[in-house]
Each structure stands twice: as C-alpha cells, then as structure tokens.
Amino acid sequence: MFTGLVEGMGLVAALEPRDVGVDLVIRAPQNMQSTPEDPVAIGDSVAINGCCLTIIAIDEQGWRFQAGTETLSRTNLGTLQVGSPVNLERSLKANARLGGHFVQGHVDDIGQVDVIDREGDWITMWFRVPERLTRQMVSKGSICVDGVSLTLVNVESNRFSIALIPHTLEVTTLGRRSVGDAVNIETDILGKYIEKFGASWQAPS
C-alpha cells in the first residue's frame, strides 16, 4: 500500500531482457538510499511510476526489479529506456502520516497526456483515458497518475484534468511530460467499490 506521495525521482540504470519480461535496475536518489534508521531490503515493495514491484537484489548499480510481459504491456514501464526518470515511493509504514490517498500500486490502464495549459508556474493538465475509468472519478476526488496522488478538477466522459503546482512539477516526472506521453492511471479504490455496488444494487420492489 502506498500514498501517492513521491519520495524522489530515480533513473533507469539498466534494462536486461529475460526469457519473460525484463530485469529493471533503478538508481534511487540519495534521500532514498538505505540507512540504519530506514533500511532498504530485498523483498521491499516500491511503486515505480505508480506500479508496485518487489526489490529482488541490491548492488552497486541500484535496486533490481523483475517486470513481466503483463506489467510491461499494461503500464508505461514497457516504454522506459536507460536514463529515463521514474517516480519512486516505498510502501507505507503503519505509523506514517497519510498525506495523499490509499494507492495500491495496481495500475488500471495507460492514459495519454491530452492538453497542457500553462498559467505562470502552474499547469492544468488533461489526460485521455478509457471511459470505464472516468466512471470511477468525481471532481475533487483522488486520482493517481504515474504514482502521484492528485486531486481531480474536471471529469468528462473520456478525460480528466488536474492542477499541478510548481513543487509537483519540479519533484516528479509530470513536469517533464508532453502531449501524447503515456502515463499510468490508478483510480481511487473507493470509486471502484462504489461503482460495483451501484451496478449490482436493485431498488426494492
């Protein structure tokens, strides 16, 4: 479980093809390096652009993960290249503040950057997504884009908008996105349950 509060941007250090999928090696920023007070260990869960993967090895190159064909085809991890920046967040500690919203790290689908409107240092960004996802969204609700917890501004049938402050643009990959770029989308788990309940509920006769 995650919160959608990105801890730092890492870089793809290596992509090593395997029989099925790839080994993905990420060089984490200095503030996320293992310390005695906050160790990073094999088996830890890390959200990479919002996709939960497990550390399988740690070496001088960085943290090593395995991504299968399903993950590569259903997320933007399949488009990464050596040197690509990625948003990183380690799993939520039970005693930590919940500053974002509950994020599972299970990407629902890939969206595309549709429009970028700049107002000074701020940006309003629109994302085009399948209509089945917008049915789980409401204005002022929560959405996770590339692992970043954000507040929905407007929701239309097949797209939605968010307002990005300068800090978010600086410390996450969203500040580097262009129109047409692929992004990972995870809708709020509450929206999923409410949609399912509404679909199965029948008014008493």
Image (cartoon, rainbow, N blue to C red):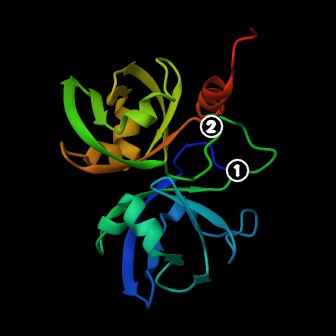
Q: Tell me which residue sits at (48%, 75%) in the image.
A: 68
How far from the left and from the top, in percent, is residue 108? 48, 48
Question: Mark 1 vs mark 2: which is more N-terminal?
Answer: 1
- Label 1 or label 2, whichever lies nearer to me, is 2
Label number found at residue 189: 2
Residue bearing the label numbered 1? 92
User: Which residue type carries mark 1?
Assistant: Leu
State whether residue 21 is above or below residue 47.
below
Q: Quadrant of residue 192?
A: top right
Q: Tell me which residue sits at (30%, 75%) in the image.
A: 82
Query: Label 1 to label 2, Cα distance in Å?
Result: 16 Å
How far from the left and from the top, in percent, is residue 202? 69, 18
Question: Are circles 1 and 2 on residues that touch, CB within 8 Å?
Answer: no
Task: Judge left or right: residue 123 versus residue 141.
Answer: left
State whether residue 190 is above or below residue 120.
below
How far from the left and from the top, in percent, is residue 178? 19, 45
Q: Quadrant of residue 90?
A: bottom right
